[in-house]
Image (cartoon, rainbow, N blue to C red):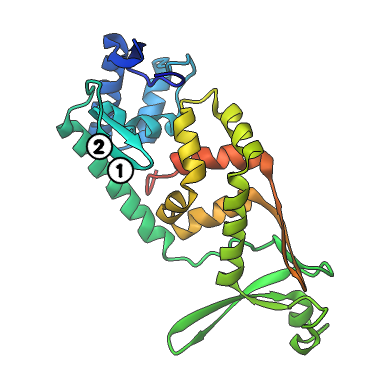
Amino acid sequence: MGGYVPLGYDVQERKLVINEAEAASVRRIYERFAELGSATMLAKELRREGFRSKQGTLIDKGYLYRVLRNRVYRGEAVHKGKAYPGEHDAIVTDKVWDQVDAILQGNRHARSSNSRMQTPAPLKGLIFTDTGAAMTPTATKKRGKLYRYYVSMDVIKNRTTEDDSGGDQAPVRLPAGMVEDAIVTEVRRILQTPEVVTQVLAALKRDQVSEAEAIAALHDFNTLWAQLFPLEQARIIQLLVRRVTVTAAGLEVDIRREGVAGVIREMIAPPDMEAAE
């Protein structure tokens, strides 16, 4: 085994072996989280004590979530999103793992309820016609079903009409779902280009995010994306997309490539998993 080694383990003859001093810290993280039910409270507690990661940095909430969700600690190996029995010894018992997992799932459910109360417009402030007019989110309800659109301010302000679009003119009204799906497809394509993969790996090198974890996140974007709730998806689009221009030929998407590493870090361990703190 090469590269990233999680807290609690060392490598001997290319295999993970337990580092007992670090393993005690890992067990404490799990057991204390099971008691507190809050990564925010636990992170503050551990930082006050000067608790540090394997790399020697003070821990934060994101670090704790990566530890708490790392199936290596229950003796498993993960490949392409699937867990298998590992060749190494577990640090955390199944009982403690299940207690922690139940808390995380409960927080996620509460977060889901809060998120789904709102229908975000992730491209608000980002999408424009090729003439520079902003396209604002609008919605109509027909027979109990909500239909969302992005509509040019030129239409809303009566500077032009929908009949003026078409042919060589950019559309002035677009179904929101269609546009948002197209943007996600473009983001996914960019995340898998070699130069972006290299950039992300370099940026995450200082965090406790393994190369395998980062590559898996980049290439399994669809799965990670589907696990996020609408408000989280909207936030990530806002972080990644600088501008979308609607032309007669299609959509032109300007991506903030410098923000990709931070987004991948958030998708691996969302920073606001707790429902209310």
Query: Outermost residue, left direction?
Result: 95
Calculate the distance from the C-alpha at mark 1 to the C-alpha at mark 2.
6 Å
Residue 147 in view, yes or no: yes
Q: Of residues 149 and 272, which is closer to you in this image?
A: 149
Q: Residue at x 73, y 78 (%)?
A: 172
Contact, mark 1 vs mark 2 (Cβ under 8 Å): yes
Please give the residue where the numbered disc 2 appears in the rendered image. Answer: 100
Image quadrant holding the C terminus, namely: top left
Q: Residue at x 33, y 32 (%)?
A: 70
Q: Secondary structure at mark 1?
A: helix
Q: Residue at x 38, y 47 (%)?
A: 276
Please give the residue where the numbered disc 1 appears in the rendered image. Answer: 104
Q: Residue at x 83, y 82 (%)?
A: 159
Image quadrant holding the N terminus, namely: top left
Say above or below: 133 vs 208.
below
Say above or below: 157 vs 8.
below
Image side of residue 112 versus residue 252, left or right:
left
Q: Position of residue 54 (x, y in %)?
A: 42, 16
Q: Position of residue 210 (x, y in %)?
A: 46, 28
Q: Amino acid at mark 2?
A: Val
Say above or below: 33 vs 112.
above
Query: Image quadrant of residue 113?
Result: bottom left
